[in-house]
Amino acid sequence: MVLIVGFAAGTLSGIIGTGSSIILLPLLVYQFGPHEAVPIMAVAALMANVAKVVAWWREINWPAFAAYSIPGMPAAALGARTLLILPSHAVDMALGIFFLVMIPARRWMRERRFRIQLWQLAVAGAAIGFVTGIVLSTGPLSVPAFTSYGLTKGAFLSTEATSSLVLMITKVITFWQLGALPLSSFLRGFIIGTSVMAGAFIGKMVVQRLSIHTFEYLLDALLFASGLSMIFEGYR
């Protein structure tokens, strides 16, 4: 069942760039417990991003990747360390509200052709990297950052995946150094990650047939679902 849900989550993530953690994490918590679910999902998410990088390799925007990732990696390591001493409920609530607000905000920025500069993307990378270290599912945070820079469809998926990959590697290494990623959790994450990777390649075939408008609507739907999910998680 975990592998089937992982495949579905990987397919969704391959279509809209993120969302696998939101779908898969509750099942992992039920199956393995909350303490082990986080590092397992970190490994599976890392593998999902590898699949998206391979699928969209030719469309990566390397300047955007560098601007986002260079400040994001040390910030993610700092966030992962902070995770061990900071309760995440308030962060979940704040992120959930932010995701909901970003639905009309993204439309407002798109209608006015609002674009951020490369240095602003670097600032976003540092901030999102830190939050990524604290809470597991922050994929939707990168959606407004990269789309406001002007990326969409394949360029957005590939650049976001490559940037998230290096942040996730930093987070996994930090978990390992702190003793929070035993071999059993790594192997479980690896096995589950293979199903997520397979779904990501299916997602590419779907994206190639989507119009820009449909893709934008799917992103808004993701932000809405993510916002409600994180508000509920923070409230609980």
Image (tube, helix red, strand yellow):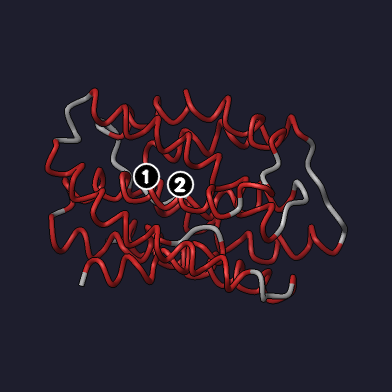
Asked whether residue 227 is in view, the answer is no
Q: Position of residue 99 (x, y in %)?
A: 55, 59
Q: Residue at x 47, y 70 (%)?
A: 225
Task: Mark 2: give few (<14), some (14-19) or many (20+) Cα within 10 Å.
Answer: many
Q: Residue at x 47, y 40 (%)?
A: 165
- Point out which mark residue 105 bears: none
Which is more toward the observer, 193 or 176? 193
Residue 213, located in which quarter of the rendered image? bottom right
Q: How many marks?
A: 2
Amino acid at the residue labelled 2: Val
Helix, strand or loop at label 1? It is: loop
Q: Is residue 43 above or below residue 196?
A: above
Q: CA distance from mark 1 to mark 2?
A: 21 Å
Compare marks 1 and 2 and give the one earlier in the sequence.
Answer: 2
Q: Position of residue 78 (x, y in %)?
A: 40, 25
Q: Is residue 61 above or below residue 157?
A: above
On the rendered structure, is 10 left or right of 37? right
Q: Position of residue 49 (x, y in %)?
A: 46, 49
Helix, strand or loop at label 2? It is: helix
Quarter of the figure with the N terminus: bottom left
Q: Position of residue 55 (x, y in %)?
A: 55, 55
Amino acid at the residue labelled 1: Val
Q: Residue at x 36, y 33 (%)?
A: 171
Q: Which residue is mark 1?
A: 135
Q: Is residue 153 above or below residue 126?
A: below
Q: Residue at x 42, y 54 (%)?
A: 93
Q: Which residue is mark 2?
A: 50
Asked whether residue 163 is in view, the answer is yes
Which is more toward the observer, 123 or 68? 68
Which is more toward the observer, 25 or 79? 25
On the rendered structure, is 18 left or right of 107? left
